Amino acid sequence: MKKYIKSACIIFSFVSMQAQQIPAPKQTKATLILNATAHLGNGKTIENAAIGFKDGKLTLVADATVIRLDMSAYENVIEAKGKHIYPGFIAPNSTIGLVEIDAVKATDDESEIGGMTPNVRSIIAYNSESRIIETARINGVLMAQVTPRGGRITGTSSIVQFDSWTWEDAIIKENDGIHLNFPATFRRSGWWAEPGTIEANKDYTKQVDEINSFLARSKAYLAEVSQEKNLVYESMKGLFDGSQILYINANEEKQIIDAIRVGKDNGIKKIVIVGGYQADKVADLLKSNQISVLIGRTHSMPNLNQDDIDQPFKLAKILTDLGIVVGLENSGDMERMNTRNLPFQAGTTAAYGLTKEQALQTITLNTAKILGIDDKVGSLEIGKDATLFISEGDALDMRTNQLSKAFIQGREITLESHQTELYKKYKEKYHQ
């Protein structure tokens, strides 16, 4: 046993030493990228673009063929003719940085014990040196909403960028919202390889009443001055004053209707639906309440036998046409390592009806708007963070998404990872 423990410690130490690449230093040289096709993230593109940034902020977004450039103002000029520039992609409702190895309990910090834990803050468990982050960066995913799991009210999320020494350095927006798993109206039974059965959730009404009761108690507590502090109820304040968003995980039509009713009845000012598999059936309700949807994983099978096989692929198009602001989220099995595939899920929505620029918006500006960070990121606009990348081709196509450079808040980050090191190693092997 001692030998096994010693071996495990050696392996863990080796893995630790091979952690994320060293964060880049603060931008010191004004940078100009010339002649690439710029996909602004707001539905517009610029051929032969001039994109300039200084001190971490975008200072120039223009057509290089129609403006007079003062080249002396830029100390670093990048010629990118034939390439493409994109704003950094955003992964909402993610557990990246909260779990490193699923089979090693000590590296899993995505949930807490308890049913109602809004006071749980995911950001303090975020590991900015996670090696999984590297694999997402090389495909253009440069930011994420780090979200806790477990229980009915899972806790409070925060939004981070992927180049930092600590979780404090990583923060874009701290404690942006609270996450609620709304009860399902039915339950499935049976092993994964068997069809099983579907039966009604007999406790549905009771579970909804529990949520109502908890929200009511929280609101009543906050309305009075209490000598004894209740951290659980204190953490709900942002939902009632509008400074935080309530993210409700709900897929069924009735779930969504009941979830919105519960939120509105209790005075919740900002609501976002996460999953939203049947959101198209309640589009008028969503629009009238100005509620956006973070669609569940695009690369998945239909939830119901009677649905079209391509329902998950075309849902973004359906909801967009109905006037709903749509973003993409990637929760589910193997979600952390699948973060790198987020741009290709957006590419699938383009294959099933959205234009390429609309598809891009689902992981850039739309998501930034939904998370409340569109004043900082999500599109290439003057004054916003210089969080962007250069790709050799279409970043939504796995065949051509090949990053040559990437910047987070103006800092040029490395695109090396454990995978790229292995690629170079074995490429050399076969050359020899």
Image (spheres, grey):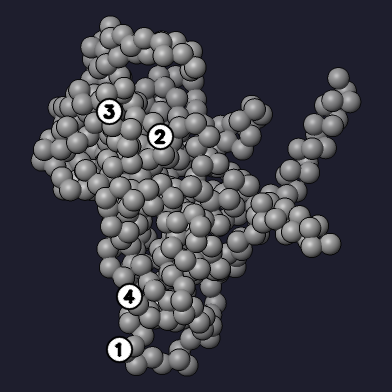
Say whether disc 2 or disc 1 marks the residue closer to the N-terminus: 1
Q: Decide: marks 4, 2 in contact (CB < 8 A)?
A: no
Say if 255 sits above or below 32 in the image: above
The residue labelled by disc 1 is 66
State the separation of the CA atoms marked 1 and 4. Answer: 11 Å
Say whether disc 2 or disc 3 marks the residue closer to the N-terminus: 2
Mark 4: few, some, or many residues within 10 Å (few <14, many ≥20)?
some
Residue at x 68%, y 51% (from the top left corner): 418
Question: Looking at this view, is 230 or 312 the one in front?
Answer: 312
The residue labelled by disc 2 is 300
Mark 1: few, some, or many residues within 10 Å (few <14, many ≥20)?
few
Q: Quadrant of the N terminus?
A: top right
Mark 2: few, some, or many residues within 10 Å (few <14, many ≥20)?
some
The residue labelled by disc 3 is 307
The residue labelled by disc 4 is 46
- Kindly identify the amino acid type of the residue bearing the numbered disc 2: Ser
Q: Secondary structure at mark 2?
A: loop
- Kindly identify the amino acid type of the residue bearing the numbered disc 4: Ile
Q: Is residue 322 left or right of residue 83?
A: left
- Kindly identify the amino acid type of the residue bearing the numbered disc 3: Asp
Q: Could you say where residue 18 lies in the image, as x and y percent from the top left?
A: 73, 49
State the separation of the CA atoms marked 3 and 1. Answer: 50 Å
Say if 35 sits above or below 83 in the image: below
- Kindly identify the amino acid type of the residue bearing the numbered disc 1: Val
State the separation of the CA atoms marked 2 and 3. Answer: 13 Å
